[in-house]
Image (cartoon, rainbow, N blue to C red):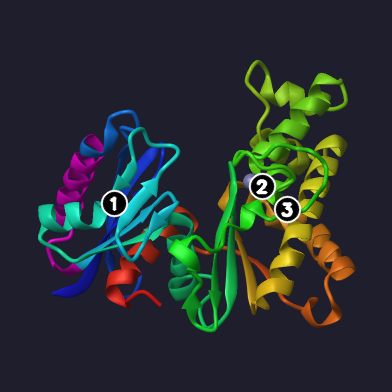
């Protein structure tokens, strides 16, 4: 028997489950579109079905419990999903006790971005550090902060909402309702917004051609940039500068040994690295300028592996 934990990554569009062995290896995996309009009962039934499936695919695993990564805000100690904005009806759901009763297993809940940070720290690009910040840049900007060997939780487990640091007085509205948040300037949504503006004004014909009749996305910008398209390279340069601004704040706040960049936009790091590092050199105090910015190593598995590690290694 191999010691292992079950893991769930509850997303607004996709529900994912896995059996993860003690060394971080994903022994079985399954996913299904989340019944986001179905309410908690429907989604919990989906979870139980997916877990049955992965368990049957890894019969040699000795399961020690279930780790769940779910959208915040949530209370990891009480095991309650407080309010998941992308899931209908998910208010104050005592997910840990419900799943524990249904499965007969110990269950631990964690914010999905924190779970991904734990995964990268314990099994990915952050291995060997005592302090690191994981930043995921896709539709939004999220992350998790490990300081002195501990995951930073703060009051009600709400620490590490790094996407909502205010970085500008420009009145750009963020998805959270605030103004000038890092997410409003550096997310994939922001990159797509700036690219669409440029396409509409006639300033980015190649991006427009790639998008065709579809809405412009960060993917189109990346594709054009890979071909050396000037406007796309300029958009990525601006994106990298905004990333550098926020990363500089994170350096000053937490003094990590590494900054670890993941997510769809984060995966474009090779094309943005020079500008990100240049921005950090310009803006950070000298003692912080040599901290490496590295690519996340686990991709979309980070959250699952990190959630499982809550049961395999405990909550740090
Ligand atoms: Zn915000």
Q: Nearer the viewer, residue 190 or 56?
A: 190
Secondary structure of residue under mark 1: strand
Above or below, 315 relative to 179: below
Q: Residue at x 59, y 69 (%)?
A: 133
Q: How far is mark 3 from mark 2, CA to CA?
A: 9 Å
Q: List the single residue furthest toward the top.
A: 213
Q: List the single residue furthest toward the front.
A: 155
Using a 10 Å C-alpha cutoff, classify the residue at mark 3 as few (fewer than 14 neighbours), some (14 to 19) or many (20 or more): some
Task: Name which of mark 3 and mark 2 comes first in the sequence.
Answer: 3
Using a 10 Å C-alpha cutoff, classify the residue at mark 2 as few (fewer than 14 neighbours), some (14 to 19) or many (20 or more): many
Frontmost of labels 3 and 2 is 3
The residue segment tinted magenta is 42-64
Report the disc number at residue 17: 1
Q: How far is mark 1 from mark 3, CA to CA?
A: 35 Å
SS majority, magenta: helix
Across and down, in percent, residue 111 comes to 42, 57
Residue 66 sits inside the magenta stretch: no
Using a 10 Å C-alpha cutoff, classify the residue at mark 1 as few (fewer than 14 neighbours), some (14 to 19) or many (20 or more): many
Disc 3 target residue:
166
Q: Is mark 2 within 8 Å of ligand 1?
A: yes
In the image, is 25 to the left or to the right of 71?
Answer: left
Across and down, in percent, residue 286 comes to 85, 80
Q: Nearer the viewer, residue 278 or 12?
A: 12
Q: How far is mark 2 from mark 1, CA to CA?
A: 28 Å
Badge 2 vs badge 1, beta-carbon distance below 8 Å: no
Residue 37, located in which quarter of the rendered image? Answer: top left
Q: Is residue 21 visible?
A: yes
Q: Residue at x 73, y 53 (%)?
A: 166
């Amino acid at each position: 028997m191999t010691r292992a934990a079950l893991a769930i990554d509850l997303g607004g569009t996709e529900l994912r489950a896995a059996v993860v062995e003690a060394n971080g290896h994903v022994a079985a995996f399954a996913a299904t579109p989340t019944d986001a309009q179905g309410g908690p009962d429907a989604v919990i039934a989906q979870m139980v079905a997916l877990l049955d499936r992965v368990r049957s695919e890894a019969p040699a695993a000795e399961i020690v419990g279930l780790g769940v990564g779910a959208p915040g805000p949530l209370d990891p100690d009480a095991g309650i999903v407080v309010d998941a904005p992308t899931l209908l009806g998910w208010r104050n759901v005592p997910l840990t006790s419900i799943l524990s009763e249904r499965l007969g297993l110990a269950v631990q809940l964690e914010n999905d971005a924190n779970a991904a940070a734990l995964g990268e720290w314990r099994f990915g690009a952050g291995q060997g550090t005592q302090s690191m910040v994981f930043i995921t840049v896709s539709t939004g900007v999220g992350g998790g902060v490990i300081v002195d060997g501990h995951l930073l939780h703060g009051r009600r487990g709400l620490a590490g909402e790094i996407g909502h640091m205010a970085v500008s007085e420009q009145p750009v509205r963020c998805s959270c309702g605030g103004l000038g948040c890092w997410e409003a300037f550096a997310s994939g949504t922001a990159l797509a917004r700036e690219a669409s503006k440029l396409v509409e004004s006639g300033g980015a014909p190649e991006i427009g051609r790639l998008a065709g009749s579809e809405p412009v996305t960060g993917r189109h910008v990346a594709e054009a940039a890979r071909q050396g398209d000037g406007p796309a390279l300029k958009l990525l340069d601006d994106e990298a500068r905004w990333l550098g601004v926020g990363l500089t704040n994170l350096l000053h706040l937490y003094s990590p040994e590494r900054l670890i960049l993941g997510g769809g936009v984060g995966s474009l790091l090779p094309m943005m690295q020079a500008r990100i590092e240049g921005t950090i050199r310009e803006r950070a105090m000298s003692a912080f300028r040599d901290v490496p910015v590295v690519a996340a190593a686990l991709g979309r598995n980070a959250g699952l592996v990190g959630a499982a590690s809550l049961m395999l290694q405990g909550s740090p």
